[in-house]
Image (cartoon, helix red, strand yellow):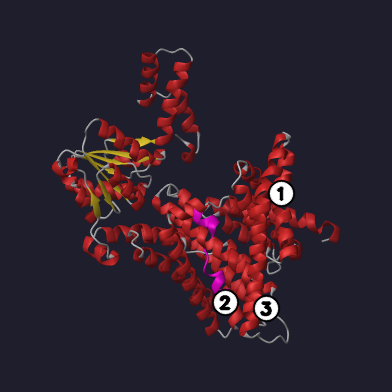
Amino acid sequence: MHPETALLFTIAGAFGAAFLFGFAASKLKMPPLVGYLLAGIALGPHSPGFVGNVELASQLAEIGVILLMFGVGLHFSPGDLLKVRRIALPGATLQMFTAIGLGYWLASSWGWTPAASLVFGLSLSVASTVVVLRVLEDRGLMDSIDGRVAVGWLVVEDLLVVLALVLLPAILSALGAGAAGASPMGRTELITSVALTLVKMVAFIVLMGVVGRRAVPWLLTHVARSGSRELFTLAVLAVSLGVAVGAATLFGVSFALGAFVAGVVISESDLSHRAGADALPMQDAFAVLFFVSVGMLLDPGVLLTQPMKVLATVAIVLLGNTVVATVLMVLLRHPLGASLRIGASFGQIGEFSFILAGLGVSLGVLSEEGRSLILAAALCTIVLNPMLFATLDRLSTWIARHPRLLDRMERQKAPRMAHTDLFETITVGHAILIGYGRVGRTIGDALQRQGVPFVAIEQDRRVVDAMRTIGVSSIYGDATRPGILEHAYPGTARLLVIAAPDPYHARHIIDMVRAKNPTIDIVVRTHSDQEQAMFEQLGVSKALMGERELAFGMAYHSLRSLGVDDDQADGIVEELRGGGRMQTREFSALMPTDLRM
């Protein structure tokens, strides 16, 4: 490869291989990230055939890290974190420190230095944000309480990793790690070094909070008024890269922190959504290069030469992330089934682990063998994650069928109930409402207007407190637990409405209620044709798909705005609702299954 064309060949080879391997991984129902890593292995110096320029790929990957952290900051929401702070803050912090301790212990048992063991433990303690969000989206959990807890947990992990990226060089330098002939500093020098790093970090954050918070949105607003999309995209990239490089040059903090803070500053402006949308293509492209470059550094031979170390590393990830996260959430009074699902989603490591491992190598602390073990563990855990999820799903279902075991494992107090006088006097012929979010509240308002007694089961304690304040009958807890559901008197209820967005919960709740009351009417919320068909096969009274009902409503108002009288518009919508969707039905038959309506 000629030096003058090395960059072009490296980029072309990386994108081409990433596309092929990523497409293959997607077809195999695995995250594309697995394909990107495999593409890097294929292009790396440890595999035969075409070999990309590792040094150039690493430099391009640095841009990927900056844009990745910029995106994390852009979507960072303090409000989302505050909503689940009672679980996410203590849970994520304890889980990370436990995983760090386990990783440190394992590396120390291999004879590694304390500095290398610390980097190794850190790298195994944080789950991949990309993988977790993909799992939540695929399972329809993003809008559920479980999804909010998982996202809050990720935010805490991301913040702790950003802090680690800032402090780690100072701590390792103070300990004399990575420098030939350097001796460890004393406690005073260590504290001084770390304090100086923290002062620089705080100074940078304060400057961005005071000046950047005004200057950056002002700049983007004026660029947006120019009407040029290209200039706006260029401005976003200039801000993200410029702040990252400036932070590293002037304040000595990492590129990652600079990019993260730049994203947070822009996230508070009205242009945050446009900035994210315009930067997303570049972010995705360079993120792919980042994962490919990581794969190029992995020596696949480690799977053959060090299989026991790879297995031990994978075990630490599963133990330190999945098991510890699940146990902590149960101890924090989160339902066991939800805790198992969230714990499963954290049973892998990804992009931040790669960044931490790369930092350890660049500081001369972590060996190439150590980085290869981390990369191999990441590849294995991401591939195994769907199977882990399925296994824990089955375990959750089995435990739910044994109420005594479930109560013993959760050690929860009796469900907190706040019944109104109406519900206390009428426990026959009432309605049970699962979930009191935006959908559930609307249904509850309709039932109240008609004077129909109902009780709502809700997992969010704050929602239950608000319901109690306004006099709505409520039960706090997980409706999949028989002990919770029994307090709603399902055996004498007339109607069950499942307004929560989780189909896995819904099916289990239906089975439990039907066991007590086979003739009860059931209305359930769905998100796809597959879910609707599944619930209809279960014999529910009505399975409503949100997007389809929205389409019917928009169709009705469109017809009315075009002069169609009310009765005729109603008739057309009812015909559509009854299955007479001519073009829609024919068009759907030509579409992939996941795009049908």
Q: Earlier in the sequence, mark 1 or mark 3?
A: 3
In-image side of 517 versus 21 (left or right): left
Mark 2 secondary-structure assignment: helix
Quickly name the residue at label 1: 237
Residue 326 at what x, y percent from top left?
A: 39, 65
Q: Is residue 145 above or below residue 493?
A: below
Q: Which residues are magenta?
A: 120-133
Which quadrant, please, contains the C terminus? top left
Mark 1 secondary-structure assignment: helix
Residue 356 at what x, y percent from top left?
A: 61, 68
Find out whether residue 131 is within the magenta segment.
yes
Main SS of the magenta part reads: helix
Q: In the rendered structure, are the residues bearing label 1 and label 3 in contact, judged by CB atoms less than 8 Å apart?
A: no
Quickly name the residue at label 2: 118
Residue 294 at what x, y percent from top left?
A: 65, 64
Quickly name the residue at label 3: 173
